[in-house]
Image (spheres, helix red, strand yellow):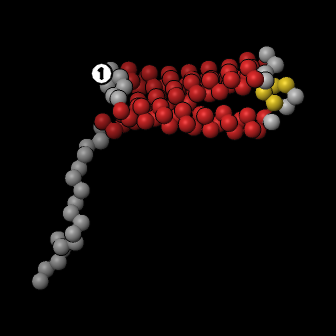
């Protein structure tokens, strides 16, 4: 039963991550902040969300969230919500970091691909 519960949570987390990713693409998150502040915030979100996830899962286990080889209903709901928060924060942090990286890349025009440049008659 635990495998089915984890599989359902995993599918929900993937769907939620995709949803957050699509939302992040449509908005410019914290673009007005200085580069250093965005880097610090993204790092804090990445590390902080991982610690929060681990702490909450340890708390669920300590409170008896796993009984008879499966999660209790309350623990399952809490694990699903906490996992969604973790995935959403991870996507947000990566969006911030990618925005920092991509703003320093100089766009270039692609070269012509018609193949006539080196041909002489």
Q: Is residue 57 left or right of residue 72?
A: left
Q: Residue at x 59, y 34 (%)?
A: 13
Above or below 59: residue 24? below
Badge 1 density bin: few <14, some 14–19, many ≥20, Cα 10 Å? few
**Vertical placement of 6 versus 31: above or below?**
below
Residue closer to the observer: 8 or 92: 8
- Whether residue 34 appears in this view of the structure is no
**Residue drawn at x 38%, y 35% as measured from the top left:** 25
State the residue lying farthest toward the left: 121
Quarter-of-image position of residue 10: top right
Question: Which residue is tagged 1?
Answer: 32
Question: In the displayed structure, does residue 96 sit left or right of residue 119?
Answer: right
Instruction: Give the camera-side residue of 45 and 7.
Output: 7
Which quarter of the figure is the C terminus placed in? bottom left
SS at mark 1 in the image: loop
Location of residue 101 (image quadrant): top left
Coordinates of residue 20 in the picture (x, y in percent): 47, 31
Residue 9: x and y, percent? 66, 33
- Residue drawn 50% across and 37% down? 18
Residue 45 x/y as whole percent: 50, 23
| Residue at x 75%, y 38% (from the top left corner) | 4
Residue 40 location, quadrant: top left
Pick the front one: 69 or 115 = 69
> Going by the picture, which residue comes out furthest to the front?
73
């Amino acid at each position: 039963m635990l495998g089915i519960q984890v599989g359902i949570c995993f599918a929900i987390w993937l769907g939620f991550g995709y949803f957050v990713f699509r939302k992040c693409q449509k908005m410019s998150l914290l673009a007005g902040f200085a580069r250093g502040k965005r880097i610090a915030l993204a790092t804090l979100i990445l590390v902080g969300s991982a610690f929060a996830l681990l702490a909450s899962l340890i708390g669920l286990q300590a409170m008896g969230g796993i009984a008879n080889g499966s999660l209790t209903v309350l623990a399952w709901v809490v694990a699903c919500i906490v996992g969604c928060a973790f995935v959403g924060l991870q996507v947000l942090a990566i969006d911030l970091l990618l925005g920092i990286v991509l703003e320093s890349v100089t766009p270039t025009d692609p070269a012509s691909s018609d193949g006539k440049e080196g041909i002489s008659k």
